[in-house]
Amino acid sequence: MTGAIFSRVAIVGGTGSLGTYIVKALLSESNIPITIIGRAGSEASPPQDSRVSLKRGDYESQEFLQETLRGHDVVVCTLGLAAPPTILNSIHQAAGAVGVKWIVPQGWGNDFQNDGLTQRIPPMQAARASRTAIVNEGMSYTGFITNPWLDWNIKSGNFSIDVNARQATIYTGSVDKFNVTTLAQVGRAVARFLMQGSQRTNSTFRAEDYRNREIYIKSFLVSQQDLLDSVQRVTNTTPEDWKVTKRDVQEYMDEGTSLMQQGDFMNGLFKVLFACLYTPGLGGNYDDKVANNALGLPQEELDEEIKKSVEA
C-alpha cells in the first residue's frame, strides 16, 4: 500500500443491528471520522463521540445522499435484509457522483458467490449485480461473507433451536458443519479492513488485495448439534429436558421453496437459507477461505457467545 485510501467513512444504517457493532469497533480501534447516515424519522441515536456525526434523510434522494457523501472515501452499507434494490442503487449512484472510492456493499450473510445457493434463492443474485453496478460507477468494493450471525439467530430461533420452549429440530440426511459469525466479530473485521486502508502498515493484510473481492470471516465451524449442546450447557439443562425432533434437510428446503413460490417470501427465504447452510456444497462451510488470521481477529469461545445470546 502506498498510503491512506480511507480517511473518512460513511455508514448507511449505522444505528442498526450490524451498523452498531461496526461503529463500536471503529471507535475502539481507530481514529477514522465516521458519518452515520440514518433514514428520516428514525429515533435511533449513535454513540456520543466527537468522531461521529449523524445525518438523517431520504435514502432515495440524490440531493441528500450526494451532499452527505461528498468528501468521504468509503461507504459501508448495513441496511436490513429487506432493503429494496432501488435504495441500494440510489446510494451507489450518489457515491459515484461525488467521488467516493470504495463501497463495502450490502450482502452480509450466506455466500451468494456460491452458484448452487443463488440458483435456489434467485433474489440473492441481486448482491452480485450490485457489485457489478459499483464497478460500473467507477468505484471499487470489498464485501464480507459472514454466514448467519450467531447471536442474532440463536436469539430468534432461526437455527431451529427454541431456547425458551426447550425444543429443537435437528436436520439429517446430507448435512455438514457450517460457519457462523457473531455480530461483534463482523464489526471487528470491517473495522480492521478500514484501518488497513487508512494508514501505512506492515501487516500481511492489505485492503488493496481485496479490491473487488469478498472477505470471508467466521467465529466458529459448528453443526446444529454443537449449537444445541452449547445451549444446554449454558442453560444448565440436559438432553432429557428438551424435545428434539429429527427431520430430513431436503424436506426443509422443499418447504421453504414452496412458501416462497406461494408468496410467503420471508418465511420461505429463511427456511431455504438455513437448509442451504446445513447442506454440503451450498456455501455453508467456507473454512478454507477465511481471512481471520490476516485481519488479526480473536478466537472466540462458543459457550461464552451462546450464553450472551440466550441471556440478552
Image: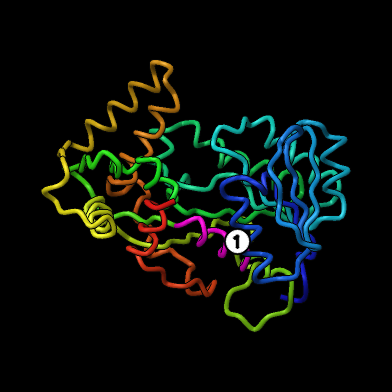
Q: Amino acid at mark 1?
A: Val
- From this view, report whether residue 297 is shown above or below residue 265: below
The residue identified by callout 1 is 190
Q: Nearer the viewer, residue 307 or 138?
A: 307
Q: Residues within 10 Å of mark 1 (few under 14, many from 20)?
A: many
Identify the residue at horizontal 54%, vertical 55% (top origin): 144
- From this view, report whether residue 233 is shown above or below residue 88: below
* Bounds of the magenta segment: 182-192
Going by the image, does 12 lie left or right of 266? Answer: right
Q: Confirm whether residue 150 shows in the render.
A: no
Farthest residue to the bottom: give it: 202
Task: Residue 185: give x, y in percent of width and height.
Answer: 50, 62
Identify the residue at horizontal 84%, vertical 43% (top origin): 97
**Quadrant of the snapshot with the N terminus:** bottom right
Going by the image, does 18 lie left or right of 76? Answer: left
On whether residue 148 falls in the magenta region, the answer is no
Task: Residue 40: give x, y in percent of width and height.
Answer: 76, 33
